[in-house]
Image: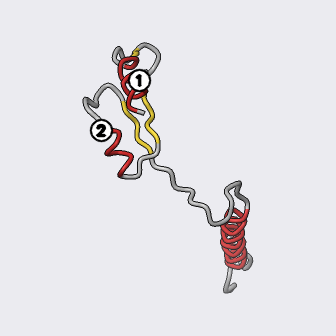
Amino acid sequence: MHRYRHKYTFPSIIILLILAFSGLVWGYFNMRQNTTVPRGSNMSVLGIELDQTKDYIDLHKLEKNGISFVYLRSTQGKSYFDDNYLLIAIKFKELT
């Protein structure tokens, strides 16, 4: 009577797990080194998206809270265009 029917299955699984784990570790450390951002710089940028559902936004308050950009969405899909988009864009240009 054979003790193991698949004597290479368990070692193969262990080897594959070790290779997968070492690949993840290598990828993590390689990703940290391969970047276009200079060392020691802050990569975090916060922004918000505005559309027709927002009535009033105080841009100065957003800026004080760390928001660095605002994205104005003018469309949703192919057929819808926000009628107030141009008015909001002009208002934001006046505030900046």
Badge 1 crowding class, 10 Å Cα cut-off, few under 14, some 14 to 19, many 20 or more, is: few
Amino acid type for the residue under numbered disc 1: Ala
Whether tag 2 and tag 1 are in contact, CB under 8 A, the answer is no
Splitting the image into 4 quarters, where does residue 18 fall?
bottom right
Q: Residue at x 43, y 13 (%)?
A: 79
Spot occupied by residue 67 in the image (x, y as percentages of width and height) = 41, 47
Residue in the image at 41% along x and 52% along y: 66
* Image quadrant containing the C terminus: top left
Asked which quadrant contains residue 88, the reply is top left
Q: Relative to 3, does residue 26 appear above or below in the rendering?
A: above
Most foreground residue, 56 or 96: 96
N-terminal of the pair, mark 2 or mark 1, is 2
Q: Position of residue 42 (x, y in %)?
A: 56, 60
Most distant residue in the left direction: 55
Picture disc at residue 89: 1
Residue that label 2 marks: 58
Q: Secondary structure at mark 1?
A: helix
Query: Amino acid under label 2?
Result: Asp
Where is residue 12 shown, x and y percent of the image? 72, 74
